[in-house]
Image (cartoon, rainbow, N blue to C red):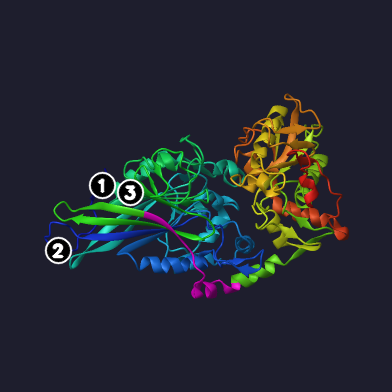
């Protein structure tokens, strides 16, 4: 097995070596970040304060961890360049062809490689290229293939790279070559098709990983780390999943360690994978292979320690033992990172304060997991407004079909102490819009049958559970993230979590299984994100060129001085027994 005995192909430069029966050992420390989502400065631009997360904090962990091993490598595992006000500001700068600060930061932290994740493509290939421009480390993706001349010009990635480290043996050193092979979910072709169609192809992760691991070995890698922006099925014993493929990838011959992500979990330490065979969530192994997933937003650093011994007679390395762990950041930020990003941080603060409209009422998402809110109503109204303009201009064949809006509350409270979006009456800023709608989704329209609409409603209702009448928050299923709780406008319905799954939603208006319905949603959902109603992209009948954040901005601007001042509509209710009316909790 590769992971038991590693052939030495690197330079042997020892000047002397002991002849003891037990060969000396070395520790290679593999350090990893993943799903940082633009959290670089450690500043919460919505709460207006510093918080212990982001690379400014992770940097302190990295420095300390490097000092505790004979050698180390630092790997970034994707979803880095999207997801925060800082990266929103970076997008505006890239559109002006300004130099971006990310490469300088990554070079300072001395990353050895950066794998691409799915969110790297949210703003197109030009932004991706601009974000990484000047990066000293290679960018990885084994299953991403540039096809068009445009893509070949913008993309500068490779399937694998080999990092060399001199390991101390006796009075000399032996070169150890570490292969890094990166993969990402093929679903980017659905989620960001408007940026990627006709420009790139994406292979299945396992096919590409098997091939490139062999290539890395043939090129001289003594051990291979699989850098996978993908996770594993959660709360399930079903192991095959084209998006969450680590369980299958771990079985590839020649994998010595795995960095994974995409799901924002901590591994080792979580229980969400416990139903999967051959996964040890306490030791941090998958089929015996050490693995780590370092959470989200730079709050943790993933660490895999490989204890290696060198066999002089056979010129091979052996993995004697391994240990996986995740380290949480402390309260100290790296002063150099603060200094490096100071001007960009100031520019982001100014960017966030730009006013784009007004609201006459508070827009709160505190109770959005339990009832309609004006904040959600704004999103629905903006989506319907946008499509109404399109219908009038283009007169599409679906203009006379029942038309609904579907949207999810991204930053809703899960309990009484949880944070949530709150926009006070008055001016609405770009920062407010970024807080209300936290993803760079575009608007898309799908045409589905009534049977699929019922399924969509029922799948959304999984975000609620049976609770206690005197405890409103006990009815929120915290295992389901808020972006998986779609609510609908254009339909009156009730959700009763006490009923069987699949029979929880009742509608005031009968839904005909064979009737066609038009649903306005986002590109993630329309292309199959979240596995709702068997959506897979084939049902899409219209793709808007505009991001939903921009649609919200234009909608508020269209309201003029009167601002957003609607009548509150309660078109859905949580029915959970006599006397339990979540709609009395406030907006």
Can residue 221 be seen here? The reply is no
In the image, 136 versus 552, the foreground residue is: 552
Point out the tag, 2 or 1, that comes first from the N-terminus: 1
Q: Secondary structure at mark 2?
A: loop
Point out the tag, 3 or 1, that comes first from the N-terminus: 1
- Where on the picture, by quarter, is residue 398? top right
Question: Which labelled disc corresponds to residue 256?
Answer: 3
The correct choice, above or below, for 527 with respect to 217 in the image is above
Image coords of residue 176 (percent x, y): 27, 58
Image coords of residue 245 (percent x, y): 46, 41
Residue at the left extreme of this rendering: 19
Point out the tag, 2 or 3, that comes first from the N-terminus: 2
Question: Which labelled disc corresponds to residue 4?
Answer: 1
In the image, 220 versus 321, the foreground residue is: 321
Q: Which residue is mark 2?
A: 17
Residue 459 painted magenta: no
């Amino acid at each position: 097995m590769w992971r038991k005995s590693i052939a030495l192909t690197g330079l042997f430069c020892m000047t002397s070596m002991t002849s003891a029966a037990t060969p000396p050992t070395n520790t290679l420390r593999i350090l990893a970040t993943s799903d940082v989502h633009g959290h670089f400065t450690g500043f919460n631009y919505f709460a207006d304060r510093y918080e212990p997360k982001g690379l400014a904090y992770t940097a302190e962990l990295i420095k300390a961890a490097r000092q505790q091993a004979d050698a180390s490598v630092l790997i970034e595992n994707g979803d880095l360049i999207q997801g925060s006000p800082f990266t929103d500001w970076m997008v505006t700068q890239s559109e002006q062809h300004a130099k971006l600060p990310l490469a300088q930061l990554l070079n300072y932290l001395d990353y050895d490689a950066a794998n691409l994740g799915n969110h790297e493509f949210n703003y197109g290939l030009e932004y991706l290229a601009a974000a990484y421009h000047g990066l000293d480390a290679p960018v990885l993706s084994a299953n991403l293939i540039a096809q068009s001349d445009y893509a070949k010009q913008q993309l500068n990635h490779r399937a694998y790279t080999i990092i060399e480290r001199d390991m101390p043996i006796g009075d000399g050193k032996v070169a150890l070559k570490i292969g890094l092979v990166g993969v990402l979910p093929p679903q980017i072709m659905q989620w960001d098709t408007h940026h990627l169609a006709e420009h790139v192809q994406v292979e299945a992760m396992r096919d590409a990983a098997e091939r490139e691991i062999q290539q890395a070995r043939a090129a001289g890698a003594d051990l291979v780390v699989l850098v996978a922006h993908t996770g594993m099925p959660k709360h399930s014993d079903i192991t095959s999943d084209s998006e969450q493929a680590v369980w299958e990838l771990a079985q590839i011959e020649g994998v010595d360690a795995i960095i994974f992500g995409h799901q924002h979990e901590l591994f080792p330490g979580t229980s969400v994978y416990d139903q999967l065979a051959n996964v040890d969530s306490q030791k941090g192994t998958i089929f015996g292979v050490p693995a780590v997933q370092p959470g989200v937003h730079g709050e943790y650093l993933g660490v895999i320690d490989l204890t290696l011994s060198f066999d002089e007679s056979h010129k091979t390395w052996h993995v004697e033992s391994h240990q996986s762990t995740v380290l949480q950041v402390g309260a100290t930020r790296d002063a150099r990172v603060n200094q490096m990003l100071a001007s960009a941080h100031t520019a982001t603060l100014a960017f966030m304060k730009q006013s784009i409209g007004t609201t006459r009422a508070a827009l709160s998402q505190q109770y959005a997991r339990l009832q309609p809110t004006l904040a959600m109503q704004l999103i629905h109204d903006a989506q319907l407004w946008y499509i109404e303009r399109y219908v009038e201009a283009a007169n599409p064949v679906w203009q006379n079909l029942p038309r609904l809006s579907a949207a999810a509350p991204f930053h809703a409270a899960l309990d009484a102490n949880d944070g949530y979006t709150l926009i006070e009456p008055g001016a609405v800023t770009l920062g407010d819009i970024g807080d209300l709608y936290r993803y760079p989704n575009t608007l898309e329209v799908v045409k589905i049958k009534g049977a699929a609409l019922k399924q969509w409603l029922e799948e959304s209702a999984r975000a609620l559970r049976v609770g206690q009448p005197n405890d409103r928050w006990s009815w929120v299923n915290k295992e389901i993230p808020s972006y998986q709780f779609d609510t609908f406008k254009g339909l009156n319905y009730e959700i009763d979590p006490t009923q069987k799954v699949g029979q929880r939603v009742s509608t005031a208006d009968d839904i005909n299984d064979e009737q066609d319905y038009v649903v306005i949603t986002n590109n993630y959902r329309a292309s199959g994100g979240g596995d709702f109603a068997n959506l897979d992209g084939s049902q899409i009948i219209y793709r808007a060129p505009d991001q939903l954040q921009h649609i919200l901005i234009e909608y508020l601007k269209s309201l003029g001085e009167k601002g957003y001042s609607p009548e509150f509509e309660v078109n859905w209710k949580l029915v959970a027994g006599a006397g339990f009316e979540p709609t009395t909790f406030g907006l």
